[in-house]
Image (cartoon, rainbow, N blue to C red):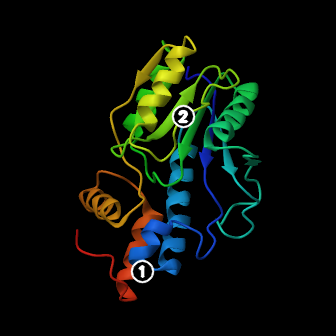
Amino acid sequence: MTERACICVFARPAILGQTKTRLAAAVGDAAAADLARAFFADAWASAHKQPNAQCVLATTAQPGGTLNLSPDTEVWLQGQGDLGARIERILRRGLAAEPLAFAVAADVPGLPPRLWHAARQLLKEADAVIGPCDDGGFYLLGLRRCPPGLLAAVPWSAAETCARTVARLEAAGMRVRQLEPWFDIDELPDLWRFRGLLQRGDVVAPNTRQVLADLATAGIDVGQG
């Protein structure tokens, strides 16, 4: 039987002018906000497809109507501190409820099922599993335990973020396994890459697909890639 897990999807409220700012520089604030809502919806749907799992939204502020949430969505505020402190806080809360806890980014829509399956399988023999991003970050972190200060002094949004996170985990005596690399959508070339995967059927992200189609219909140029 699949072990119980708490899947924590990290997302900020999709506020116009404050959302996906690097992407907004290329497509405009309104399109970036629409895409952020779609990314979250697809990431949320992917999390909900996982067996034997509790799904929660881990966010920086009450999202109100910015993320199209259902009334029964469980929302956990990340609280204060840098990203490492906030991830720790959420994962410890998740581990208080379930044997496993995962942090996954909302700007990784439609994460392929094989990666979710691999993460759950690897945690059968490990204390931690991490999914490296091509830009040096990570798209998923799964833990069996989360001692205080586990992610202290990790540089965020840096080329060495994933490597330094692995080093911190290993320094805490944790057995760490790594997934195959994937990517998050921060800039226009990331969106081009994701759109290619959608067109080939390599990912399933219907909300993102619809927003891309709507933008094209509205004449908003997201480039050809």
State yes or no: discs 1 and 2 in contact (Cβ < 8 Å): no
Q: Is residue 172 above or below residue 136?
A: above
Q: Quadrant of the C terminus?
A: bottom left
Crowding at mark 2 (Cα within 10 Å: few <14, some 14-19, many 20+): many
* Residue ID for mark 2: 154
Crowding at mark 1 (Cα within 10 Å: few <14, some 14-19, many 20+): some
The percent position of residue 167, horizontal first and vertical second, equals 47, 22
Tell me: 130 left or right of 172.
left
Q: Is residue 211 above or below residue 110?
A: below
Q: Quadrant of the N terminus?
A: top right
The percent position of residue 174, horizontal first and vertical second, equals 54, 14
Tell me: 136 left or right of 105.
left
Q: Nearer the viewer, mark 1 or mark 2?
A: 2
Residue displayed at 37% across by 35% down: 114
- Disc 1 on helix, strand or loop? helix
The percent position of residue 88, horizontal first and vertical second, equals 67, 33
Residue displayed at 66% across by 63% down: 13
The percent position of residue 99, horizontal first and vertical second, equals 66, 21
Tell me: 103 left or right of 136.
right
Estimate the spatial distance between the alpha carbons at disc 1 and disc 2, rounded to whole Å. 39 Å
Q: Amino acid at mark 1?
A: Asp
Residue displayed at 61% across by 67% down: 14
- Disc assigned to residue 53: none
- Disc assigned to residue 214: 1
Residue 53 falls in which quadrant of the image?
top right
Residue 64 falls in which quadrant of the image?
bottom right
Residue displayed at 53% across by 53% down: 106
Tell which circle, 1 or 2, labels the residue nearer the N-terminal end.
Answer: 2
- Disc 2 on helix, strand or loop? loop
Q: Amino acid at mark 2?
A: Val
Q: Is residue 125 above or below residue 90?
A: above
